């Protein structure tokens, strides 16, 4: 079955009690047993919920995995993956990553004895320099946030394979429509389903997808033991969002290309970071592992003062000034003070994330209106 069909049908069957075509929101905390221990596969809703089951199966199918495990947010999903590890273990992480991921690694899990190395992975060979007997995992985000660097997933998978490490890929920016990391050798895919999967800026949700059964059992154990589960209504919203992912992504890609090219030609714009440009340093990798280049991009102005950036950030009308990304509506953001404020400034600058950088999540509105809105704001 192809992706567009899976997005609509995977995991979803007519409801057994009514025939409802859409999986109902099973808003219940427990399930009645006919005799002690005799039940229909559902005992308590932290452990199992039919709405969540449908979504977990759908997510597994669309990432070409075998098991989906859902969480209350993308960071709760990341938290569960880290709990696979033990004190003393080391993780090699791509730099220029989501601020909240950096925060949970450095401020939470470092206290529990995990050691993180944040490195530039545009050349996957860099990973080799940080390997030792304690290394247990490689964690990558690609394209990176917000500088849109692209990391070669298959090359990382090869290193992980050689050294018996787990490779986790945060696939939030690309979505399974643009890139399927498990097919390239990753062991774990993690999503903030808050973004493209949900797609409508109306839910916070996270997901993990794996192929391996033993790994899945560990993650289900953590899901149930630690309890960061999503509610059934949130699962329903993500399940509904998935049904249009392919159609939305096509438009995100078209609009993204138009906006990136517009910015690049604009007299007042300096650098534009978008992996669809043929002269982007990692374009060849993007072309190889992605089906399109999406609607995420960042740019700087020729006037690199904070004042000029702030003026643009507060002058758009269709691009709403807000954190988050991946919804149908276009957003504009300022990584240094918003999504990436939890990363120390020196570290941000070292990675090229300057104070005046502006990030766009290009939505699926009529592109002419989006270009006019930007043109009007960048004066
Ligand atoms: C938003 C985001 C997260 C965190 O997800 P939440 O659902 O907000 O907890 C993780 N990774 C990336 C790339 C994100 O954009």
Image (cartoon, rainbow, N blue to C red):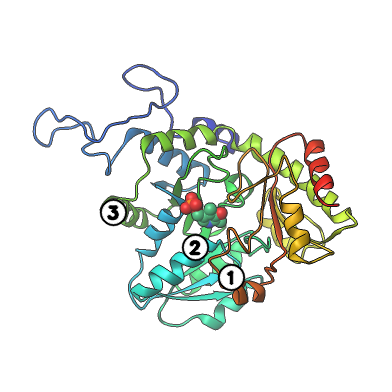
Residue under label 2, please give it: 101
- Residue under the point 68% across and 42% down: 330
Secondary structure beneath disc 3?
helix
Q: Nearer the viewer, mark 1 or mark 3?
A: 1
Q: Ligand 1: does it lie within 8 Å of the C-beta at label 2?
A: yes
Q: Nearer the viewer, mark 2 or mark 3?
A: 2
Residue under label 3, please give it: 221
- Residue under the point 56% across and 61% down: 98
- Residue under the point 44% across and 21% down: 21
Q: Residue furthest left?
A: 36
Determine which of the numbered discs, if any, sits on residue 95 in the image: 1
Which quarter of the rendering shows the N terminus? top right
Q: Is residue 284 above or below residue 92?
A: above
Among the 4 quarters of the image, the one containing residue 108: bottom left
How far apart, in angstroms, are the residues tagged by discs 1 and 2? 11 Å
Q: Residues within 10 Å of mark 1 (few under 14, many from 20)?
A: many
Residue 213 percent location from the top left of the image: 36, 53
Q: Is residue 325 left or right of residue 236?
A: right
Q: Is residue 121 left or right of residue 203?
A: right
Q: Residues within 10 Å of mark 3 (few under 14, many from 20)?
A: some
């Amino acid at each position: 079955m192809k992706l567009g069909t899976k997005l609509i049908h995977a995991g979803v069957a007519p409801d057994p009690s009514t025939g409802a075509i859409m999986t109902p929101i099973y808003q219940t905390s427990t399930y009645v047993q006919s005799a002690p221990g005799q039940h229909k596969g559902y005992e308590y809703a932290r452990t199992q919920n039919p709405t969540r089951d449908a979504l977990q199966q759908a997510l597994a199918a669309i990432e070409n995995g075998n098991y989906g495990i859902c969480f209350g947010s993308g960071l709760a999903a990341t938290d569960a993956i880290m709990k696979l590890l033990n004190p003393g273990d080391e993780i090699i992480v791509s730099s220029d990553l989501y601020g909240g991921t950096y925060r949970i690694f450095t401020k939470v899990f470092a206290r529990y004895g995990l050691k993180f190395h944040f490195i530039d992975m545009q050349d996957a060979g860099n990973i080799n320099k940080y390997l030792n007997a304690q290394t247990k995992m490689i964690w990558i985000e690609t394209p990176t946030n917000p500088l849109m660097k692209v990391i070669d997933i298959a090359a990382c998978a090869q290193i992980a394979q050689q050294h018996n490490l787990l490779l986790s890929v945060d696939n939030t920016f690309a979505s399974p429509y643009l890139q399927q990391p498990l097919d390239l050798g990753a062991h774990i895919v993690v999503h903030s389903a808050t973004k493209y999967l949900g797609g409508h800026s109306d839910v916070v949700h996270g997901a993990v997808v794996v192929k391996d059964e033993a790994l899945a059992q560990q993650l289900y154990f953590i899901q149930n033991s630690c309890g960061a589960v999503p509610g059934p209504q949130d699962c329903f919203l993500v399940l509904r969002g998935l049904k249009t992912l392919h159609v939305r992504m096509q438009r995100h890609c078209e609009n993204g290309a138009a906006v990136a090219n517009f910015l690049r030609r604009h007299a007042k714009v300096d650098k534009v970071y978008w992996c669809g440009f043929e002269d982007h340093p990692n374009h060849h990798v993007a072309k190889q592992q992605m089906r399109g280049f999406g609607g995420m991009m960042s740019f700087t102005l020729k006037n690199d003062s904070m004042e000029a950036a702030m003026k643009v950030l507060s002058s758009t009308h269709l691009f709403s000034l807000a954190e988050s990304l991946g919804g149908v509506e276009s957003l504009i953001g300022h990584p240094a003070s918003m999504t990436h404020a939890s990363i120390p400034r020196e570290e941000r600058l070292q990675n090229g994330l300057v104070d005046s950088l502006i990030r766009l999540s290009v939505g699926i509105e009529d592109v002419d209106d989006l270009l006019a809105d930007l043109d009007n704001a960048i004066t």
